[in-house]
Amino acid sequence: MSPDPHFAPVLSQHAIERCSAAVGLKPALPEKAFVRLIEAAAKDLETRGFRRQAVSSFGVEVGPDGQFKTLAPSPDMPQVFVSSTQSEHLTISPAGFNWTSTSYVRWQPFIGGFEQIVLPYLSKALETVSVSAVKLEYWDRFYWSGDWTNFDATRLLKKSDYASGLLSRPREWHSHVGWFEAIEAYRRLVNVNIDVVEMTTSPDIVPRPSIGIYSSLTDQANVPAYGETPEQALNERFVIERLEAQHLALKEILGHIITDEMSNRIGLFSRTSQNARP
């Protein structure tokens, strides 16, 4: 007898496809400071097994005679560095840093990688500019074992404000919820997207219904009417503290979205679990 149709996380122990931590800078790094930072990062990251990803870009200018002229790439274009396993990416731009992992296992290795790889370059940038915002993002995915004829989103999703009025829809749908709120002296932007789509984990496997959940928190400092933070306090420690707080808050948000059964399965709140987010 075949088991009842059910949802399962994309991986055996957790549902995280991707996780990303970002730091915004204010103002943007000046061109010369950015170029120096990229030159230093390129040399250092090569010794750590990262390679600089080729970025192709060009601009077009129309002259007084109406002729098009191709412009050289701007020296302050964002630069991407990829690990030897292709699973970690560091993007550095004048506006900030983004650290992304597609092989998330636990929070400590993820934030540890951020501290080891990103913080040294953030420290250099903070000699010139300041931190404006800190952002943490998660992409979770769950696959349905059946097909659209027996699809039931309520086997994974709770009735909540995040997907109000959509749970009974028989096929694809999209939900987006977002708002600002005050957290300590910061303005926090909360974003949650839920997508019901047909996907596959391999070209050799027939596509199946799935539910993807994107959640993110962005904490912005020194926003009028939300509070003030001294510039000297917007340092590396501040960034790590905000990411740690966002990690815990996003666990709570996901716990309000998915069933308690699935939360237990992926070890969402277990301190001893070896799964996704202990």
Image: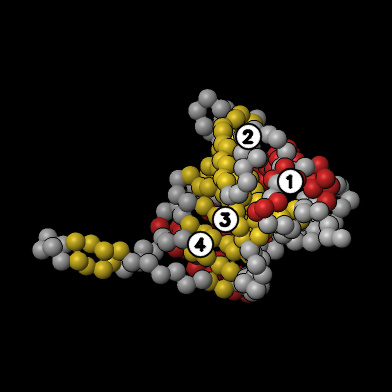
Instruction: Give the label, 3 or 1, closer to the camera.
Output: 1
Instruction: Give neighbour class at mark 1: few <14, some 14-19, many 20+ (Cα, 10 Å).
Output: many
Decide which of tag 4 and tag 2 comes sooner along the chain. Answer: 4
Decide which of tag 4 and tag 1 comes sooner along the chain. Answer: 4
Give the distance between the C-alpha atoms of the residues marked 3 and 2, in whole angstroms. 32 Å
The residue indicated by pointer 1 is: 156
Q: Looking at this view, is 23 or 232 the one in front? A: 23
Q: Quadrant of the N terminus?
A: bottom right
Give the distance between the C-alpha atoms of the residues marked 1 and 2, in whole angstroms. 14 Å
Q: Amino acid at mark 3?
A: Asn
Q: Which mark is residue 108?
A: none
Give the distance between the C-alpha atoms of the residues marked 4 and 1, in whole angstroms. 45 Å
Name the residue located 50 percent from the left edge and 62 percent from the top edge.
37
The residue indicated by pointer 3 is: 98
The residue indicated by pointer 2 is: 164
Decide which of tag 3 and tag 4 comes sooner along the chain. Answer: 4
Name the residue located 62 percent from the left edge and 34 percent from the top edge.
165
Q: Looking at this view, is 187 or 12 the one in front? A: 12
Give the distance between the C-alpha atoms of the residues marked 3 and 1, in whole angstroms. 30 Å
Q: Is residue 130 left or right of residue 140?
A: left
Numbered disc 3: secondary structure: strand
Q: Amino acid at mark 2?
A: Ser
Numbered disc 4: secondary structure: helix
Residue 6, horizontal then vertical, whole percent? 77, 53
Decide which of tag 3 and tag 2 comes sooner along the chain. Answer: 3
Residue 123, can we see it?
no
User: Mark 3 and 2 residues: CB-CB less than 8 Å, in contact?
Assistant: no
